[in-house]
Image: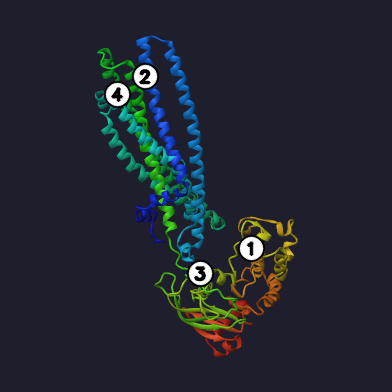
Amino acid sequence: MNNLTDDKLESNYKGSALLHLLRYMKPYLGWVTVCLVLVLALTAFDLYRPMLIGDAIDLFESQGNYDVIIETAIKYGVVLVLSFLFNITQTWLLQKMGQSIILTVRKDLYAHIQSLSSRYFDLTPVGRLVTRVTNDVEALDEMYSGILVRLFRNIVMIIGLAAVMLALDFRLALISFLLLPIVAVLTVVFRKVARQTYRVSRTRLTDVNTFLSENISGMRIIQIFGREKRKFEEFNDKNHKLYRAGYREMMVFAIFRPLVFILSIFSLMIVLGVGSRDVLGNVISIGTLYIFSQYIKSFFEPIQELAEQFSTLQSSIASAEKIFTIMDEETLVKEAENPVVLPRIRGRIEFSHVWFAYDNENYVLRDVSFVIEPGEKVAFVGATGAGKSSILNLIGRYYDIQKGNIYIDGVDIRKLSKKQLRSAIGQMQQDVFIFEGNVEYNIRLHDDDITMEDVKAAAEYVNASRFIEKLPGGYQEPVSERGATFSAGERQLLSFARTLAHKPSILVMDEATANIDTETELLIQEALEKLMEGRTTIMVAHRLSTIQHADCIMVMHKGKIREQGTHQELLAQDGIYKKLYELQIHKDMS
């Protein structure tokens, strides 16, 4: 499903989005009930006010008593005060409920995104996910904060107005409804067009956010290659598409509103024309004609609002389709129903006839088997695409294999607790991600079990304390996004300290020293040797000089282990490893 477009995802999900939205209202059914009662009361007040004035007009005309006007004014004032109080209560309840539900939806969505497997993030742009968690969730707010209740109110209002008008004068009421079929046709057309424009608008917004997320992150590359003009043209194209979608959305309202308003004026003209003749013929009273004139205004207004609310509801459903499509996305790497929790992970790793493909078709690992005993230092070498990094990803079970088995301490990793498994593996990668916050946070990552003393000890162990203590704020020094104010070597040292602080049983290093200068590498070499002592260590490196001390070196070629042994043993075999070694020596000498 990940490779489908947004439109296809929506069409596949279309049926149950509204049910999911209503499910979030379940804890607030009491509040909703109170709001509906208040709606009925407010609708009754709206129906009563014109009748109150109409009756007063008739009484004053027949009796000429000013006391009727004073009495009516007092009643009208009481109704207005009650309407004001009821409106305040209803608005507060709806806003409180809406914000609480939005808080829950956003929290549930982000929690679910965190649970998804790495493959999902390989295929889904970050900007799309950001749009789902922010813009699309926010689009639900208006629905929860009023649309559903106002929808109910307008339906009740239309039914109430129609019933009262028919009861007052059946013939004049039917005349008032002459233009309703045209309004009904306009409403159906408006709903259909509005839904499509909303959907296009949301898709265009997602495209812009995705483009911005990718290109702002890669701005340095854009500037290095001088592609600013081309990238601006791409952004301008997407921006204009969003503009056109928003313009079409606005035009739908700009056409629909005036049409309904004109029809309401025509209907009022017909009623006033027919009603005036009936008043002169003593068929109806002036008060009745006044009530009808007010009801005509009130009758078309909820119809217009109803159509717009339906379109807003459609917008919310369009956003909900996108949101709940993600919520229904199942993680490919599933936790076992009753996961095995080992007393302690010692670090014995075994691959048994493992076959693995990211897309389930093109295998990057083919029948790979090996055993790494606890405390052993094993290195994987080979050309790019040989499958080295894939092995590291599989050990942490970020992906699941198609065939074979992987064991940690004799237990299939698919039966182990993912939390325990990953917490026992310390990964140090070439591409270090530093979070916004401070130095201490980037080492601890909000792990309450890691004390400040542990943080400092880890930093000292990898010699990161040398540059940290020179910072103005020390361990509390603010860190910008992605650690942009630190050098590549400093960011790498921070990642080493982070790994050490979490005390892993298994160390995984994927080109971990590639971005570190020679002087910095010498500083951490001794620390790494201490760190690897007693821990299972798996290394991937292109510089063979960094892995010569390994207990075993495995040479990967086209997804298979072609050679294995110590550095000296592999050189003696006169195979792939020796060729790689000689090529690197020749390169270094040149």
Q: How far apart, in angstroms, are the residues tagged by discs 4 and 1?
A: 72 Å
Q: Does residue 146 lie above or below 114 as drawn?
A: above
Question: What residue did someone put label 1 on?
Answer: 447
Asked if one can make out residue 36 in the rendered structure from this viewpoint, the answer is yes
Assign a secondary structure to mark 4: helix
In front of the other: 147 or 89: 89
Which of disc 4 and disc 3 is earlier in sequence?
4
Q: How far apart, in angstroms, are the residues tagged by discs 3 and 4?
A: 72 Å
User: Alpha-carbon neighbours of circle 2 within 10 Å: few (<14), some, or many (≥20)?
Assistant: many
Q: Residue lying furthest top in this view?
A: 64
Q: How far apart, in angstroms, are the residues tagged by discs 3 and 1?
A: 21 Å
Q: Residue 160: which quarter of the image?
A: top left
Question: What residue did someone put label 2 on?
Answer: 54
Q: Where is residue 129 in the image (x, y as percent from the top left)?
A: 48, 55
Question: What residue did someone put label 4 on?
Answer: 168
Badge 4 amino acid:
Leu
Q: Residue 60: which quarter of the image?
A: top left
The label number, if any, that marks residue 398 in the structure image: 3
Q: Where is residue 424 in the image (x, y as percent from the top left)?
A: 59, 72
Q: What's the residue at 74%, 56% (across, down)? A: 472
Q: Residue lying furthest bottom in this view?
A: 572
Of badges 3 and 4, the one in the foreground is 4
The quadrant the C terminus occupies is bottom right
The label number, if any, that marks residue 419 in the structure image: none
Q: How far apart, in angstroms, are the residues tagged by discs 2 and 3?
A: 74 Å
Which of disc 1 and disc 3 is earlier in sequence?
3
The answer to the question of whether label 3 and label 4 lie on touching residues, with beta carbons closer than 8 A, is no
Which of disc 3 and disc 2 is earlier in sequence?
2
Of badges 4 and 1, the one in the foreground is 4
Of badges 2 and 3, the one in the foreground is 2
Of badges 2 and 1, the one in the foreground is 2
